[in-house]
């Protein structure tokens, strides 16, 4: 079976970061995604508001680098889950479980050093990379290729 979804849109609000009782990081975001076609009556494109959930290192990455209004590309799977509302009615919720989170725009003015266009080192963020304390790990795990920069990050070119 195949369950794969890719969406591109803007974050409606800042990511909501939480941890489970077991200490697992989870973040939820709501994204505004424009449809590819225009409404025949109004002539305007409609927007869908889609809930996205990310877990573990991906959740930490999203909470650190994404804010309200930022364009994002999310790759993952669609999940439909049942729940009971406050009145005891059975409902279903649809959400995208993010496997990869990409930047969908370049760095905005005054964005304080976020990466533009893609995840650092040209990779989507999904699988955890081993990170030595205080440094950055290379995608292949060879941390000797990169060293931590001392000083203020605001003077970096990205």
Image (cartoon, grey):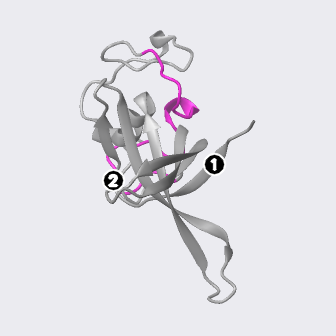
Of residue 123 and residue 111, the one placed in the foreground of this image is 123
**At which x and y percent is residue 65?**
38, 42
Q: Which element type, helix, strand or loop, lies under badge 2?
A: loop
**At which x and y percent is residue 42?**
62, 88
N-terminal of the pair, mark 2 or mark 1, is 1
Q: Quadrant of the C terminus?
A: top left
The answer to whether residue 47 is magenta is no
Of residue 3 and residue 63, the one placed in the foreground of this image is 3
Of residue 53 and residue 129, the one placed in the foreground of this image is 53
Q: Is residue 146 above or below residue 53?
A: above
User: Please, what is the dominant secondary structure of the magenta stretch?
Assistant: loop
Q: Which mark is residue 6?
A: 1
Which image quadrant for residue 19?
top left
Count of all numbered marks drawn on residues in the image: 2
Q: Which mark is residue 134?
A: none
The residue carrying pointer 2 sits among few (fewer than 14), some (14 to 19) or many (20 or more) residues within 10 Å by Cα, namely: some
Q: Which residues are magenta?
A: 105-130
Q: Residue at x 67, y 78 (%)?
A: 38
Q: Is residue 145 above or below residue 108?
A: above
**At which x and y percent is residue 157?**
41, 41
């Amino acid at each position: 079976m195949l369950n794969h979804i890719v969406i591109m849109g803007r974050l409606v609000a800042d990511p909501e970061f939480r941890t489970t009782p077991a200490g697992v990081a989870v973040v939820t975001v709501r994204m505004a995604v424009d449809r590819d076609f225009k409404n025949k009556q109004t002539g305007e494109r409609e927007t869908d508001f889609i809930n996205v959930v990310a877990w573990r290192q991906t959740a930490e990455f999203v909470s650190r680098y994404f804010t309200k209004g930022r364009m994002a590309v999310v790759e993952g799977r669609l999940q439909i889950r049942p729940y009971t509302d406050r009145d005891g009615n059975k409902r279903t919720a649809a959400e995208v479980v993010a496997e990869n989170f990409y930047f969908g725009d370049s760095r905005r003015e005054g964005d304080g050093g976020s990466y533009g266009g893609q995840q650092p080192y040209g990779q989507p963020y999904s699988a955890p990379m081993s990170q030595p304390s205080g440094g950055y790990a290379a995608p292949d795990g060879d941390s000797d290729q990169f060293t931590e920069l001392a000083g203020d990050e605001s003077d970096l070119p990205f």
